[in-house]
Structure formats: structure tokens, C-alpha cells
Amino acid sequence: SSSDTSSEKNEKSESESKSYVAFPQDHELNVKVRKTVTFSTTRIREYDITIGDNPSCTSGAPISLDWDYTLHDEIEVDLYEASRLHPRRTRRQFIMNDFKRRDKLWSFGYTIEEIDKAAKDVDVYRRQRILTVYFQPFYRIEELFIT
């Protein structure tokens, strides 16, 4: 089977003729690569709010973003930043107390009954979470006996 040996020779010659270039990794060159991202324009989405279900809310009904939003026109980032009326808020300024959340939800059309029900539901979720954390070591012991 001379055709077998000729095809083997062709495969060998093709693989021998290929050249490969190895690029060293950044850490091998000991070079720091500075990675940056820039944006020229942005588009603002303004989301509606809805009653949330986050058990981390310590009192009252939590607020979440709704799926619905208003899409504003595209604007250059530099123009947007230059025309800001207020400075950026700190993390602390994003925290709302129970009364502020209740007022916001009410202004979005939720009834006091809906808001109070959500607050009670979240209390239940929070208690369930506390019990789960408290009894978690016992679950592990139970797993040892079952397996």
C-alpha cells in the first residue's frame, strides 16, 4: 500500500512546514498592562418601582425595581456629567427608612393594605432565614447520620 505511505509523507511534510509562534504571558515579560474602557455616549433608563421581597430590609416593605422603564435619548457622557444638577449620592444616601419607602410606594399607586401585607410577608421570610441559619449545624449532623 504505497498510497498509505505517500499520504503519511504528505501529512508529515505538512506538519513539518507549519510554523508556530509562542507569545509569552504578561507575567513572563514582567510588564504591567493598563486596561481601560471609555464611553462616548450613554442612554439613561428610568425604572418604575414595585413592592419587593428582600428579607434584608429590616423594617417595613422593601422596594424593588420594576421591569418597566422609560428610555431617554442618547447623550454624550461628558455633556451628561457636565450638566448634572446634583453631586453623586453616597451609599448612605441610598438607604431609605420605613416611612420614606412607604411614601414612595404609596405615590406609585400601592394601597396601604398592599404595603402592610408586603411588610408582614418580609417579616416571615426574615424569621425563616434566621431559623435556617440557627439550625444549619443540626442539618449537617443529620446528613452525617443519613449517609
Image (tube, rainbow, N blue to C red):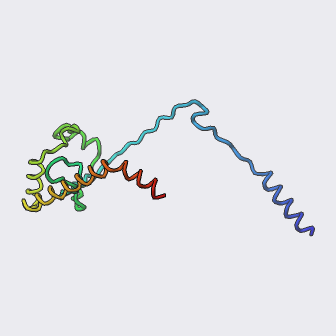
Query: Which residue is located at x 69 percent, y 44 percent?
Result: 21
**Residue 134 percent coordinates (x, y):** 30, 48
**Residue 130 percent coordinates (x, y):** 26, 49
Query: Which residue is located at x 49 percent, y 58 percent?
Result: 147
Q: Nearer the viewer, residue 26 or 112?
A: 112
Q: Nearer the viewer, residue 67 or 10?
A: 67
Q: Work out whether 60 lies above or below 36.
A: below
Q: Nearer the viewer, residue 139 or 3?
A: 139
Query: Which residue is located at x 89 percent, y 63 percent?
Result: 5
Q: Nearer the viewer, residue 56 or 10?
A: 56
Placement of the N terminus among the 4 image quadrants: bottom right
Query: Which residue is located at x 22 percent, y 59 percent?
Result: 66
Residue found at the far right of this picture: 2
Q: Answer with the quarter of the image where residue 48 lies.
A: bottom left
Tell me: 141 left or right of 50.
Answer: right
Tell me: 48 left or right of 14.
Answer: left
**Residue 36 percent coordinates (x, y):** 43, 39
Tell me: 81 left or right of 19.
Answer: left
Q: Answer with the quarter of the image where residue 87 lies.
A: top left
Tell me: 87 left or right of 24.
Answer: left
**Residue 119 percent coordinates (x, y):** 14, 55
Residue found at the far front of this picture: 145
Instruction: Count up the numbered dots.
Output: 0
